[in-house]
Image: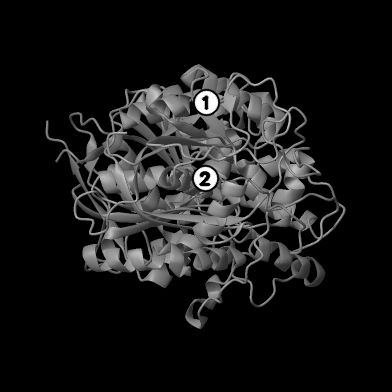
Amino acid sequence: MDKTIYIKAAALCSPEPGELQAFALEAMPVDKSLLPAALRRRTSLTTKMVVTAALHACDRAQCDAGQLPSVFASVGGEIQVTDALCRTLPDKDALLSPTQFHNSVHNTTAGYWSILNQCQAPATAIAAIDDTFVMGLLEAWAQLQQRPGDLLLVCYDEHWPQYLAPPMGQVALACALVLTSEGRRRLPAISRPEIEAEPEPMDKQLMHFIQRSPAAAAIPLLQALQIPDAAGRITLNISAPRWFTEIHRVAA
Amino acid sequence: MSALNPIQPVAITAYASLCACGMGNGALYRSLLENTSALGGLSLFDLPFSTPVGEISVPLPEIRPELEAYNSRNSRVALAALYYAEDGLRAALHRAKSTYGSGRIGVVIGTSTSGLYETETAYETLLKEQRMPDDFHFLTRHAYQATPRFLQLELGLNGPCYAISTACSSAAKAMAAGQRLIDSGVCDAVLVGGVDTLCRLTLRGFRSLDLISPQRCRPMDKNRRGINIGEAAGLLLLEKRSGSQAPPLAYLLAVGESSDAHHMSTPHPEGRGAALAMTSALQLAGIAAERIDYVNLHATATKINDRVEARAISEVFGDAVPCSGTKGITGHTLGAAGGVEAIVSLLAMRHGFIPGTCGLEEMDDCICQVIREPLPERSLQTVMSNSFGFGGNNASMIFSTKTDG
């Protein structure tokens, strides 16, 4: 199983941590103090939420955030910044804020993450609507096949204005995973994400929550991480075709 | 960071482009040979300032009714490139589909703003009526993944499908992702590249950063005043080397990626991220810098970007390698730039010439060898093309006529 990857650590962050209790998961609140003042002023809630989850995951994995390649997966990215700019544009003469403009790109969080950690490793930003988490995991998996070591994957979405794609974005959530190509004893191992031939219906409550918060597609995997010796197929998305990964623990 | 193991080259079996030069690779090739600018006036919308743009003026095809929800200018530009018979991309995809099966073909497309243009128009209604217009479809028109998803549905493919959006390095990063999906056995073929279309936000946003040139841009010129923005689709079909029934047009050897870790909109002054992307590409390709016959520069025509790139080039190559930038012809096509400039590099290799740097009149005190007018009859075996974006996000692609560079 040389193509297996391993999960070193996970962390969740949400401004509404209570929403995760229904799934027996703990999310930490956004911790703005993790950013130095200059970056705190410039960054959105999105970036602060991602940084909170990612730094905690790196801390739990005991790895150096300054060395990690990273994959940032999000449907809307800096959707609040984009919304504010789009509201300005109908005024034909209005001047846009240069900071808001460069903060509207999809890789804004990736950029600030690299600056915060002085990390020159590759950082990418992807999007795939309902498949955003699984495509992020697949991209991470493929990167680890090519470049062995550790890698950071963060799946996240902010609160969305509800006139864009309701109910998407009703709950803001960031899920960070530190993945590695190097198996160690007792680390949860996952296989390459693949398409499920005969998908089973997903729990309705979970399905509804993922529709409101696309990063919640990581919940089944996060729940499995909490079960010692969890083994079996984990669903990774809600739309067709359904994708899964197989989880197991490396034997002692 | 861990050491980079060389990656296996992948075949490029078809490519297609649409930009301000006109329809297809042929139009782009003619503009490159003549070294003439396709930049002109903007007709799509009004701006509170004046700047030349690289607007696509050829008629765009209609989206078929079943996929009307995906109808954006971005998707129509992609469709036009896909369907232009002379470039043969659609035929190549149909052949790949019957060879490998639809589930073995991925779609990874770079974009910076996708269908934002349609959303900007919808916000005019939102502000007036406090509701979006009835034909507003955010996820299928504006969302980053709208165009790759449209292409997947249009072509009837079932493999992995996602957008990469890392500003101006998006399309080059999509090429990297496509190569990895093939190298790791997830896919046998991947449609990669970039599509980006003109919108108010990028033009007025770059203007707010004081980076827009009021005249035609002049990459690497002493008197450069900034960028011109263009729109384009640059799409390529990558395939695994064994099993491909079509003779490869060239190979993608590797894409080196890095982060500046410096600033959101300004490159590191010493070009450390740019140099790292280029050296990583060489390491991944398993070749020495001397093997690169030509570098297609990112060369946006802002003073700092150009100077930093020249410095990084000189660090990696000395002054030995001929370089040029082609954004004076097409404009800066942002998230599509890596796709269009990959095709510029492939056309240069196929036709044996070094493109010029349109707009360059008086050379800046530049430490790299910038080619002003096209040089005909140059045999190019291995070529590098750079893409550097906001957030300090860098990618350098290496193409070759041979698998070992």
Q: In this figure, which colouring scheme has been used for the structure?
A: one colour
Q: Which mark is residue B273?
A: 1
Are the residues tagged 1 and 2 within 8 Å (C-beta)? no
In this picture, residue B73 sits left or right of residue B285:
right
Furthest residue to the bottom?
B65
Which corner quadrant holds the N terminus of chain A?
Answer: top left
In this picture, residue B43 sits left or right of residue A121:
right
Q: Is disc 2 on the same chain as disc 1?
A: yes
Near mark 1 (Cα within 10 A), the count class, few <14, some 14-19 or many ≥20, is many
**What is the chain identity of the residue bearing mark 1?**
B
Q: Which residue is at 50% across, 64% downward?
A: B81
- Is residue B386 visible in this depiction of the protein? yes
Say which amino acid is labelled 2: Glu
Which corner quadrant holds the C terminus of chain A?
Answer: top left
Percent x, y of residue B279: 42, 24
Disc 1 from disc 2: Cα separation: 20 Å
B143 vs B268, nearest the viewer: B268
Q: Which residue is at 59% across, 32% downward?
A: B371
Q: SS of the residue at dot 2?
A: helix
Q: Which mark is residue B341?
A: 2
- Is residue A218 visible in this depiction of the protein? no
